[in-house]
């Protein structure tokens, strides 16, 4: 690899052999976020106070109507909301390699299903639903339980816990390290389902996590 300016003037431009690639460095996430911020600011976007991963900039649409273009960025997922979505996405693509197959009307974003509906007044609107992610999560949990001969009910369950469940009174046996790891992964799934819109199970997910 050819060394860049970050290696200092005495090494910049020299060739170096990569002996081993190091992943998971503490600074990696922050460095990528800083790079992402610089790129988006250069394109004229501003990070919103409500969510740092939502970027907006003023634009003019049809009939000279002013509005805000929005770019949602989460690690390597990108969703553009704009009357000129292809143009805005192309600008982002100058800094990051985008998969050609992923460019087009969105179908999924962060596990949530995106679709369109026509409102009674004729306006076309976008919808976002966690249904597909929930179904896949349930399939994975059922497969996991069957592989280990765990028993489970097949009837539909609306909430993760019984109505009168009291965790402080739970006397079930403690999990071994492997089981605890699986349990934590299930909690992660529940938390993401809450993030995608199922806020009705947020309380139960927090109880199970604690």
Image: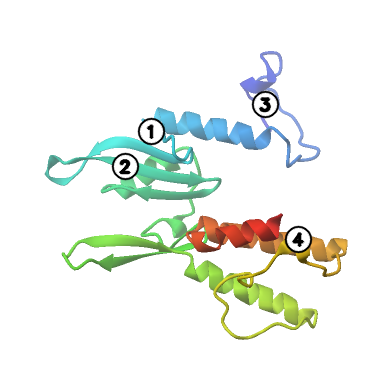
Residue that badge 4 annotates: 168
Query: Which residue is the site of mark 3?
Result: 3
Distance CA(mark 4)–CA(mark 3): 57 Å
Question: What residue is shown with label 1?
Answer: 45
Q: CA distance from mark 4 to mark 2?
A: 48 Å
Q: Secondary structure at mark 3?
A: loop
Q: Earlier in the sequence, mark 1 or mark 3?
A: 3
Disc 1 to disc 4, how far (Cα)? 48 Å
Q: Quadrant of residue 201?
A: bottom right
State the image coordinates of residue 127 (x, y, percent, origin top left). Answer: 36, 62
Q: Earlier in the sequence, mark 2 or mark 1?
A: 1
Placement of 6 over or under 54, stated as above or below: above
N-terminal label among 4 and 2: 2
Q: Who's the residue at 31% across and 42% down the image?
A: 69
Secondary element at image label 1 = loop
Residue drawn at x 69%, y 21% as measured from the top left: 7
* Residue wearing tag 2: 69
């Amino acid at each position: 690899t050819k060394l860049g300016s970050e290696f200092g003037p005495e090494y910049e431009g020299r060739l170096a052999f990569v002996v081993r690639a190091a992943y998971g460095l503490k600074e990696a996430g922050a460095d990528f976020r800083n790079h992402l911020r610089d790129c988006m600011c250069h394109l004229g976007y501003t990070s919103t106070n409500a969510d740092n991963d939502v970027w907006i900039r003023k634009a003019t649409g049809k009939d000279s109507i002013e509005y805000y273009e929005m770019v949602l960025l989460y690690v390597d997922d990108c969703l553009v909301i704009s009357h000129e979505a292809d143009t805005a996405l192309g600008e982002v693509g100058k800094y990051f390699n985008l998969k050609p197959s992923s460019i087009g009307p969105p179908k999924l974003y962060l596990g949530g299903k995106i679709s369109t509906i026509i409102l009674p007044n004729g306006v076309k609107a976008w919808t976002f639903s966690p249904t597909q992610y929930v179904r896949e999560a349930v399939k994975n949990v059922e497969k996991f339980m069957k592989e280990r001969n765990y028993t489970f009910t097949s009837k539909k369950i609306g909430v993760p816990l019984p109505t009168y469940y009291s965790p402080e009174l739970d006397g079930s046996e403690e999990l071994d390290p492997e089981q605890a790891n699986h349990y934590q992964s299930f909690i992660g799934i529940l938390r993401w389902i809450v993030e995608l819109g199922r806020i009705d199970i947020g309380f139960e997910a927090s109880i199970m996590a604690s």
